[in-house]
Structures are given as structure tokens and as C-alpha cells.
């Protein structure tokens, strides 16, 4: 194979990325001149060059010139400069995303000579080469499960209108690789992109108001509409193609192991705007999208189904189904297909009508004029599929019908399973009122945990209800009860799979789950038949978030598994219990290194508890987008789990900007899901053939000690330093982030001003803006040093752990990423906003010493000369971005200082606030991270 075609050694690939960046940024330059004259472009270039000079070789002269240039900008000019740098990053991000698609195509063009690492074909080929038989592969595919859950967490700072423009620019920019373009077409392409960048320049990137929950639902559905509905079946198609290639003697239909779910419209924890009415409306919107997509698919299919009975004999089964349809449905003359020889088109007309009639009759009624379930729709599609194959039109079926069948299997009539989430305290309050009104308990909340479990278990075993339609409840209790009634009604109307899980935030006791079971029983979601069999269609899912909760989790689950009424509900669920682990609050509680360790320990200890009772577990990993909240590439997050904890399936949250980065563009969405599939199969193989290193027990003891010391160091600063919280609020744009209008949910759990009330998202977002990235690395160095003690033998042990232990390697590499993105020179600039400068200097010095210690130890453990040397592409990307992020950071400090002084005098300036918010957006785009 020629060098030019080898995607692994092709330096021209990097040149193409640079070409795209130069091309798009030159267009931006033209737009700047067009909108602000040569003066605007000149000042942007001057700031850029000064910033680069400071990075290359810092001198006080260059620093002073840089600062004076920024300080001299008039407000109108300053705003344009901010937007210029922010849009620059948006265009660079697009170029980098397109480059990922290009590299994927480079491998595919190599026609099998080079298989891309992390691809579906790479893992199937490896299975084949290692002698894994077809039946064993089939068993692996039946066992694996991955559900990706999109959430409404407010970490997407970019407006939908701006993302639409990004998508158009990305699509047009990909055409630069088209060798068939003529000079005239290339000029036209440039003009098109010039228009798009101009539109981007004149589009307000800031929201005028907070989005409503329904706005967030629409934003979430955007990804299903634009990419996921098409891309997800393509992933299955590629897997089946590879299986047929490497295992040709077996007929393959891969089980639906990869799905998407959603929290948007169901997550009511801390968001009073999410009501039972909103949840019902959300489900209706999701079904409407699914039906619209199916109808469009049927209409498209119609164009390929001109088979004539005079040439091809259709199946009797198809003819009989049309006869049944004609007896049940009365189509208007203009809706009937006039050519009676084109049987498939006649059938498709009836199918479209049955789709349209969904929702026209009452829930739960078996209406012959509509599809009462997605299974009914699938039955008709399979009838068409079998008929096509009967007259050897299998090419059409494989290319069109089978794809639609897969879509219905994946998305049903509900599009995405909706999880419901609520805080445990809300259930306790409602239960206390309900039991008091029925005379069961005067004060349920005051009972001991043992008394609560006994009482609730008794209620579960008693067929009598504990609520009455004739009693009046407080608004909050009534809403709590209405949620369960809505879920029951939804399962009848939208299908059993529309809502399966009820997540309980801040689960601290077994009673937290039993309360949900009792409320489920009230509406028939949990019921015992006369035979004694329990039917349960909603599972309570504990969410263990803090370090203390993670410690308590195994015994909480043991208590539940020992209760017969609870075990009976699990039988109805296939002996499968879902458990969610929170990465955000555990990190905020104990620091990144301790959180990672405690989560791993919890995974294993909870699994051991379940094994004692023969219960399978599906772990739900509540990862955020940022490193400080467990964020990492999807494939790495799957492989980071202990192999013996993935057997019952995995769920992972996909939050905020992760959605737009991974799923806004089809090529990127496909690659992300392909890598996830590769990782999932790889993890399943590892679980079947575990290779436990005898040293791992020793390493776990070492990690325990490291974690304890890291936690002490972290909590000494975050919780026990009386000046820290004030320093945090004054040195970061925390108050202003709340004015960014990026989510419907409040940034605090309560109206109080305590650190404990602050949500993890703004906590991480604020530190990211200041370039500290403190939640993603702080205290790790002290933890590592506590074991090292400057002993060369101990360093050799840490180096061995990095080389041989995937958990430790992943932890160290995540720390590298955080350290590379952090910049304490810039962070120190934010200290000027702290009123007490002695406090500012003291705390900054503590943080800087820890940063330097952590960096030094990471380099020694990895044997590298520089942070991220093992990922040169990422190292280079961060290095190139920094000089462009720096001006935004310096301007943000100046703007925040000015705004806060103004507000301190009781005045305000909306223009100034808008500039602050523009810098927040720009830095988020530059670092590709919010929180």
C-alpha cells in the first residue's frame, strides 16, 4: 500500500486539518473586515500576536503591552473582539470534528488493509483471530447492554440556533475534500461559507430567557430527529456486516443492546417546573416525533415498492393483511392507492393511516383502526419483509425494510425511555402526610429506619390502599401521587417501555426505595395477583452520590434483597436491579482521586452484595461532561469499569455540551457510538475471561491509603478552611454563570448560600472558567506523595501500577488531561477580584504548590518529559488553543471587576453583563468544556 493511502502514517492528514482551520479563520477575517473594518481585524490580530508572544516567552514588557491594549478597548470594540475570539473557537471545533470524520473515511478507503483502532470491525476481527466461535459471540451480544441517557443538566451554553449554523458549516466544509469540485464550485462553496460565518456573526449566542422544560425537551429531541434515528441503525448494520464477513456460516440479527433514554421532562429533583403534566406532555412529544419519522420512512419506502403482481407474486399473508385492513379502515378515495397491481403500495397506505390514528382513541383501548403498540407495527413490517423475500426482492428488504424494522425495535412509539427522578426527602414528606391522614402513623418521618422498613413492608403486603380520593392533600403530596398515576397511564398509552425506572436522589436508607414501591402499589405499578405472583412495572433505582452514601450502599441493598416483597418485585424484572452512582457529588464531596477510588470500591462491594442473593445489577453511571464530574470519552468510560460489574448492563448519562460534541453531526455521532460498541464488546470479553493480576490486591491497599490522604487534603481546603468559600465566589464568575440562562433548573438545591447547597455543575463550571480546573486534579499530588515518601522503590511500584493496572492508568491519564488544560498563570489573574488579598495569596499559594507537586509526580510515574506527551494530538490542540483563550480570560477578569464594582454601588449595566456572558461562552468553546 502506498504511503499516501496509509491513514496511520499520513502526515498530509494533519495538513488537511490545518488547511481547514486556515480556510475557516480566513473567512472569519473577511467577515470581521466586512462588519468592523480593517481596524477590527488589526486589533484582533494584534491581541492574538501579543498573546502568542506571552506564551512563547513571558516578559513584563509584553504583558504590560497586552494588558494596556485590552484596557484601551472601548466597550463596543471590546464586545466585537470577544465575539471574534469566541467564533474562532467555534470554527476550530468544527474543523476538528470534521477531521475525525476524515480520518474515519481514510481507514475505510484503505479497503480493509488498515482497520481503524476502536472500530466495530477491529473487535469482530480480533474475536475471530482468537478463535472465539460464532455461538460464543452470539452469547456475548445477548448479554451486553448499554443505554445512553440524555439529561437536561444546564451545561450546554450554546443556543440551538447557533448549533444549527455549526451543522451547516460543518457539512459545507467537508466538501473541501471533494476532488471533483471545479474552480467555480470551490468559489461557490467559499461564498456559501462566507454567508454562514456572517450569519453566525450576526446571531446572538446568548439566550434572552431561561429555557422552559418543554424547550429542553425540544432540544433533546433535536438529536433524535437530526442524527440518532438514522445513525443508531447504521451502527447495528455495520456490526451485522462484520459478523457476516468474519462468521459467514451463521445468520445474524443482533439484539438491541444499544439504546438511548432521557431524563428531560422526567427529572424533577430540584426543578419545580417538572410536573406530572409536563412529564405527560414530554411523552406525547416523543411519540409524535417517532410517528412522524415512521410515516416519513413509509412514504420513502413507497418510492421503492412499485413491484407489480403481474411480474412478482406477493405472499398470501400480505394479501390477507390488506383484506383485514380494508375491513377495519375506511380510506378516502384520494388516500387509496389506485393501481391494484401494486400491492405493497396499497399496504403502505393502510399502514400510514394506522399510524395517523394513534392517539385518536382513549388510552388502553384496543382500537382496530390504529396500531395499539409498536409490536403491531412491527408485525406489518415483517409481513412485508417476508413477502419481498418470497419473490427474491431481498436487496430491497435488506436496504430499506430491515432498517425500519431496526428503528421500530429501538425507538418503539416512545422514542426514548424516560426516567423519572425525585429527591428522597420529597417521598418521605408525602409518605408522612399520607400515613397520618389514614391513621397508620402519626409521624412516619420520626420513626427509626428499622421501624420504617417494618411499616412499609407491611403496607406492601396488604392489598388495601393507603390513599383516598376523598381526602385532601397538600400540593406537594398531591403532585407526588400524581406522578405515579401519570406513569401508570403512560405505560398503557405509550407502551410498557416508555418509563421503567424511578430514580431516588440522595438515597440514604432502604426505606427510600420502599416508599417508592408503596406509592407504586397505590396505582397498580406494583401488584400481587391471586396466585401470589407480583407484577411490577416500575423499578425504584437508588442514586448513591456522596462518599458516605457510597459506603452505606452495600448494606442498604442487602436489607432490600432480604425482604420477600422486594425480591418478588425483582422476579418481575428478571432478577435485575438498577443502581445509579453519582460522579458529581462524590467528587465535590471528596475530590477527584478519592471519588474515583470510592466509586470503584462501591461498584465491587455492591456487586458482592447482589451476588449473595443471586441478583444481577445494571449500574447507571451519572457522569458529567467535565473531568471534574467523571467526564471522559464514552469508550474509555465503559472500559474504566471493573470487568465483573458490567454483566447486567450499563447506563451512562450524556450531559450538556457532550450532546452537541458527540451527536450534532452524523459522522461524529456514528464514530462515538461505534467506539462505544467496540468498548462494550471488549469489556464483555474481559468479563468472560478475567485476567486478575495477583498484585491487584496489594495495589488496592496502596490506593486506599492514597485516597484517604487525598480526601483529607481536599477537605482541609474545601470544607475546613473558613476563607475558602468566599475566595471561590469572589475569584470565579459563579454568580454571573447563574445569569447565563442555560437551563430551567436552579443552580442551588435551596435558596441558601452554603457550599453544601451548591450543585456540582456550577461548581465545576466556575473553576473551568478561571482555568484552575481545581475539581479535576486537586489533592491528587498529596495523596500520591503520602505513599511515595521519596522512596525510589515506592515510585517503581506506582510506575508498575500505571503500566499494569487499567484503573490506575485511567486515573493518572485523566489527571494529565486536567493539568494540561489548567493554567495557574491565568488563574492568578482572577485573584485580583478577591477583597482580602492576604486570603487570595494564601489560598492561591496552596493550590499552586499542589499543582506543581501533582504535575511533578505524574511526569515521574508516566516517565514523560511533558504533561500529555502520551497523547500528542491533544497536547498540541491545547497548546495551540491557549493563546486564543487567554485574551478572553484577561478580558473576563476586567469585566467582572467593573461589573461587581458597579453592582456594589447598587447600579447595573446590561451591556457589561452581556460582555461577561460572552466571555463565559467563548472560554467554554475554547476549552470545549463547561461543567
Image (spheres, rainbow, N blue to C red):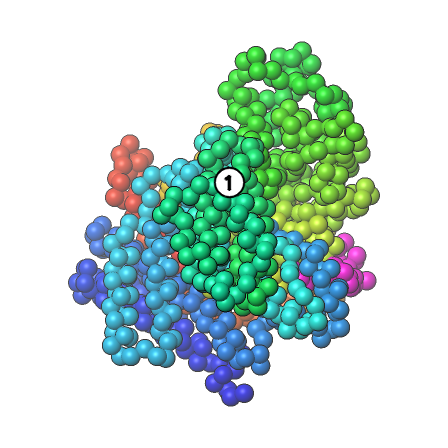
Quadrant including the N terminus: bottom right
Taking the magenta stretch, the answer to whether it contains residue 427 is no
Give the residue drawn at x 75%, y 64%. Answer: 135
Tell which of 200 and 257 is nearer to you.
257
- Residue under the image location 65 percent in, 53 percent down: 145
- Describe residue 195's horizontal placement relative to residue 263 as left or right: left
Q: Say few, some or many: other residues with alpha carbon within 10 Å of mark 1 (under 14 / 14 to 19 / 20 or more).
A: some
Residue that label 1 marks: 328
x%, y% of residue 208? 31, 41
Would you place residue 763 above or below residue 385 in this image?
Answer: above
Q: Nearer the viewer, residue 493 or 659?
A: 493
Q: Tell me which residue sits at (45%, 62%) in the image.
A: 306
Q: In the shown orientation, is residue 578 left or right of residue 609?
A: left
Give the residues in magenta.
680-702
Q: Residue furthest front?
A: 310
| Residue displayed at 33% across by 57% down | 165
- Where does residue 694 sit, x and y in percent of width and height? 81, 62
Q: Secondary structure at mark 1?
A: helix
Residue 632 visible in rendering: no
Amino acid at each position: 500500500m502506498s504511503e499516501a493511502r496509509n491513514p496511520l502514517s499520513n502526515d498530509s492528514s494533519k495538513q488537511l486539518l490545518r488547511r481547514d482551520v486556515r480556510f475557516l479563520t480566513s473567512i472569519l477575517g473577511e467577515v470581521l473586515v466586512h462588519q468592523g473594518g480593517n481596524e477590527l481585524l488589526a486589533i484582533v490580530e494584534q491581541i492574538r500576536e501579543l498573546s502568542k508572544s506571552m506564551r512563547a516567552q513571558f516578559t513584563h514588557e509584553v504583558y504590560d503591552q497586552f494588558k494596556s491594549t485590552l484596557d484601551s478597548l472601548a466597550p463596543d470594540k471590546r464586545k466585537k473582539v470577544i465575539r471574534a475570539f469566541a467564533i474562532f473557537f467555534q470554527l476550530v471545533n468544527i474543523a476538528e470534528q470534521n477531521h475525525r470524520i476524515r480520518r474515519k473515511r481514510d481507514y475505510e478507503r484503505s479497503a480493509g488493509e488498515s482497520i481503524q483502532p476502536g472500530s466495530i470491525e477491529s473487535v469482530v476481527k480480533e474475536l475471530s483471530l482468537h478463535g472465539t466461535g460464532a455461538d460464543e459471540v452470539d452469547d456475548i451480544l445477548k448479554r451486553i447492554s448499554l443505554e445512553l441517557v440524555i439529561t437536561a443538566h444546564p451545561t450546554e451554553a450554546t443556543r440551538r440556533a447557533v448549533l444549527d449554523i455549526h451543522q451547516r458549516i460543518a457539512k459545507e466544509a467537508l466538501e473541501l475534500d471533494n476532488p471533483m469540485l471545479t474552480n467555480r464550485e470551490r468559489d461557490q462553496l467559499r461564498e456559501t461559507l462566507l454567508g454562514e460565518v456572517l450569519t453566525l456573526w450576526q446571531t446572538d449566542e446568548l439566550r434572552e430567557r431561561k429555557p422552559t422544560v418543554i424547550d429542553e425537551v425540544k432540544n433533546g429531541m433535536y438529536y433524535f430527529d437530526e442524527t440518532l434515528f438514522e445513525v443508531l441503525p447504521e451502527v447495528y448494520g455495520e456490526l451485522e456486516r462484520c459478523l457476516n464477513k468474519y462468521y459467514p456460516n451463521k445468520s445474524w440479527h443482533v439484539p438491541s443492546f444499544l439504546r438511548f433514554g432521557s431524563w428531560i421532562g422526567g427529572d424533577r429533583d430540584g426543578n419545580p417546573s417538572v410536573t406530572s403534566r409536563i412529564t405527560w406532555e414530554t411523552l406525547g412529544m416523543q411519540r409524535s416525533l417517532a410517528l412522524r419519522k415512521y410515516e416519513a420512512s413509509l412514504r420513502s419506502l413507497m418510492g421503492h415498492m412499485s413491484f407489480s403482481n403481474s411480474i412478482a407474486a406477493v405472499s398470501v399473508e400480505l394479501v390477507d393483511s390488506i383484506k383485514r385492513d380494508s375491513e377495519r379502515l375506511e380510506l378516502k378515495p384520494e388516500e387509496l392507492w389506485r393501481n391494484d397491481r401494486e400491492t405493497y403500495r396499497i399496504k403502505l397506505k393502510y399502514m400510514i393511516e394506522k399510524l395517523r390514528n394513534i392517539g385518536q382513541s382513549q388510552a388502553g383501548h384496543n382500537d382496530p383502526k390504529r396500531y395499539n403498540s409498536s409490536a403491531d407495527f412491527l408485525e406489518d413490517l415483517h409481513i412485508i419483509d417476508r413477502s419481498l423475500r418470497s419473490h427474491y426482492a431481498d436487496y430491497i428488504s435488506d436496504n430499506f425494510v430491515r432498517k425500519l424494522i431496526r428503528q421500530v425495535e429501538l425507538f418503539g412509539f416512545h422514542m426514548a425511555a424516560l426516567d423519572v427522578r425525585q429527591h428522597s426527602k420529597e417521598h418521605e414528606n408525602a409518605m408522612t402526610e399520607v400515613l397520618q391522614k389514614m391513621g397508620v402513623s402519626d409521624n412516619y418521618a420520626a420513626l427509626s429506619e428499622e421501624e420504617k422498613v417494618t411499616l412499609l413492608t407491611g403496607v406492601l403486603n396488604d392489598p388495601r390502599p393507603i390513599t383516598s380520593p376523598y381526602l385532601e392533600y397538600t400540593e406537594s403530596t398531591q403532585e407526588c401521587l400524581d406522578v405515579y398515576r401519570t406513569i401508570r397511564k403512560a405505560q398503557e398509552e405509550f407502551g410498557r417501555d416508555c418509563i421503567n425506572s424511578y430514580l431516588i436522589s440522595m438515597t440514604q436508607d432502604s426505606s427510600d426505595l420502599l416508599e417508592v414501591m408503596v406509592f407504586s402499589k397505590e396505582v397498580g405499578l406494583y401488584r400481587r395477583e391471586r396466585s401470589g405472583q407480583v407484577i411490577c412495572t416500575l423499578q425504584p433505582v437508588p442514586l448513591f452520590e456522596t462518599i458516605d452514601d457510597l459506603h452505606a450502599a452495600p448494606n442498604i441493598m442487602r436489607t432490600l434483597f432480604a425482604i420477600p416483597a422486594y425480591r418478588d418485585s425483582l422476579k418481575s424484572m428478571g432478577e435485575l436491579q438498577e443502581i445509579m452512582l453519582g460522579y458529581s457529588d462524590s467528587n465535590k464531596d471528596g475530590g477527584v482521586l478519592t471519588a474515583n477510588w470510592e466509586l470503584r470500591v462501591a461498584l465491587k462491594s455492591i456487586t458482592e452484595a447482589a451476588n449473595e442473593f443471586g441478583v444481577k445489577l445494571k449500574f447507571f453511571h451519572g457522569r458529567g461532561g467535565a473531568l471534574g464530574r467523571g467526564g471522559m470519552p464514552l469508550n474509555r468510560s465503559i472500559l474504566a469499569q471493573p470487568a465483573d460489574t458490567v454483566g447486567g448492563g450499563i447506563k451512562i448519562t450524556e450531559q450538556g455540551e457532550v450532546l452537541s460534541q458527540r451527536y450534532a453531526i452524523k459522522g461524529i455521532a456514528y464514530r462515538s457510538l461505534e467506539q462505544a460498541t467496540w468498548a462494550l464488546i471488549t469489556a464483555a470479553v474481559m468479563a468472560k475471561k478475567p485476567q486478575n493480576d495477583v498484585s491487584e490486591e496489594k495495589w488496592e491497599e496502596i490506593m486506599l491509603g492514597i485516597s484517604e490522604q487525598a480526601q483529607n487534603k481536599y477537605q482541609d481546603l474545601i470544607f475546613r478552611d473558613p476563607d475558602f468559600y468566599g475566595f471561590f465566589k469572589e475569584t470565579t464568575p459563579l454568580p454571573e454563570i447563574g445569569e447565563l440562562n442555560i437551563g430551567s433548573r436552579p443552580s442551588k438545591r435551596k435558596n441558601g448560600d452554603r457550599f453544601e447547597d451548591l450543585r456540582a455543575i456550577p461548581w465545576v463550571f466556575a473553576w473551568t472558567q478561571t482555568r484552575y480546573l481545581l475539581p479535576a486534579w486537586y489533592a491528587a499530588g498529596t495523596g500520591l506523595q503520602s505513599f511515595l515518601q521519596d522512596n525510589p522503590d515506592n515510585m517503581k511500584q506506582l510506575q508498575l501500577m500505571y503500566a499494569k493496572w487499567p484503573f490506575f492508568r485511567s486515573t493518572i491519564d485523566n489527571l494529565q488531561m486536567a493539568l494540561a488544560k489548567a493554567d495557574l498563570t491565568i488563574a492568578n489573574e482572577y485573584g485580583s477580584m478577591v477583597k482580602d488579598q492576604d486570603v487570595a495569596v494564601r489560598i492561591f499559594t496552596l493550590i499552586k504548590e499542589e499543582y506543581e507537586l501533582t504535575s511533578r509526580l505524574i511526569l515521574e510515574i508516566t516517565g514523560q518529559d511533558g504533561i500529555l506527551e502520551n497523547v500528542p494530538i491533544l497536547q498540541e490542540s491545547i497548546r495551540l488553543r491557549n493563546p486564543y483563550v487567554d485574551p478572553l480570560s484577561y478580558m473576563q477578569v476586567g469585566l467582572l471587576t467593573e461589573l461587581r464594582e458597579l453592582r456594589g454601588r447598587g447600579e447595573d449595566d446590561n451591556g457589561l453583563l452581556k460582555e461577561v456572558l460572552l466571555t463565559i461562552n467563548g472560554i467554554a468553546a475554547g476549552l470545549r468544556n463547561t461543567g
